[in-house]
Amino acid sequence: MIGTHLKDIRQKKGWTQLYLSQVSGIRQGELTYYEKNLRNPTAPKLAALAKALSVPMEALVEGADQIPALQEIPAEQFVHGNSTTAQLQKIASQLNPEHQRNLLHHAKLLMMAQENEQALKLKSSPRNSKKVA
């Protein structure tokens, strides 16, 4: 249960409920309810707890010991089978919200880099200008 996992992770870090309350912005009384499994946190509060504890949300839901290490996806998987877009969507759907935001951020950075490369190529190539008679 979420509360049990929350308490376990908090205690492994050596944190008190008061400290977790301060770093997460969630009232200490709410944390007590969560840790006693009397109430489950909302998605935004779960995200705040995960961020404060520096763990993926899955660690709070499934338990820190149940999260398999991320495995590197072989490059050949991106060439065969489904389209790249479908594969990216599948991967993104399996990420927690924080990692989805990171993926989006990196994709935007790649787009900006590509646009800069294209702009540099245009500047360095001879212009196709017609002479006016």
Image (cartoon, grey):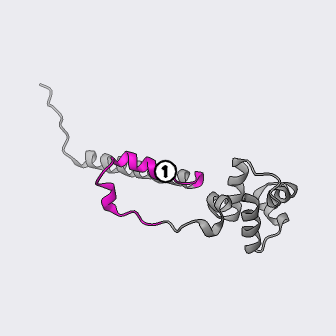
Q: Quadrant of residue 133?
A: top left
As helix, strand or loop, the secondary structure at mark 1 comes to helix
Q: Residues within 10 Å of mark 1 (few under 14, many from 20)?
A: some
**Residue named by callout 1:** 92
Is residue 116 within the magenta segment? no
Q: Position of residue 96 (x, y in %)?
A: 58, 54
- At a point 49% along the width and 50% down the height, the residue shown is 92
Please indicate, yes or no, whether residue 43 appears anywhere in the rendered image: yes
Please indicate, yes or no, whether residue 104 appears anywhere in the rendered image: no
Nearest the eye: 27 or 125? 27
Q: Position of residue 81 (x, y in %)?
A: 30, 51
- At a point 20% along the width and 40% down the height, the residue shown is 127
**Residue 117, placed above or below residue 133:** below
Nearest the eye: 83 or 124? 83
Q: Quadrant of residue 33?
A: bottom right
- At a point 75% along the width and 64% down the height, the residue shown is 4
Q: Is residue 121 left or right of residue 131?
A: right
Q: Position of residue 70 (x, y in %)?
A: 49, 65
Tell me the quadrant of the picture where the N terminus can be found.
bottom right
Q: Give the residues in magenta.
A: 71-98
**Residue 9, placed above or below residue 58:** below
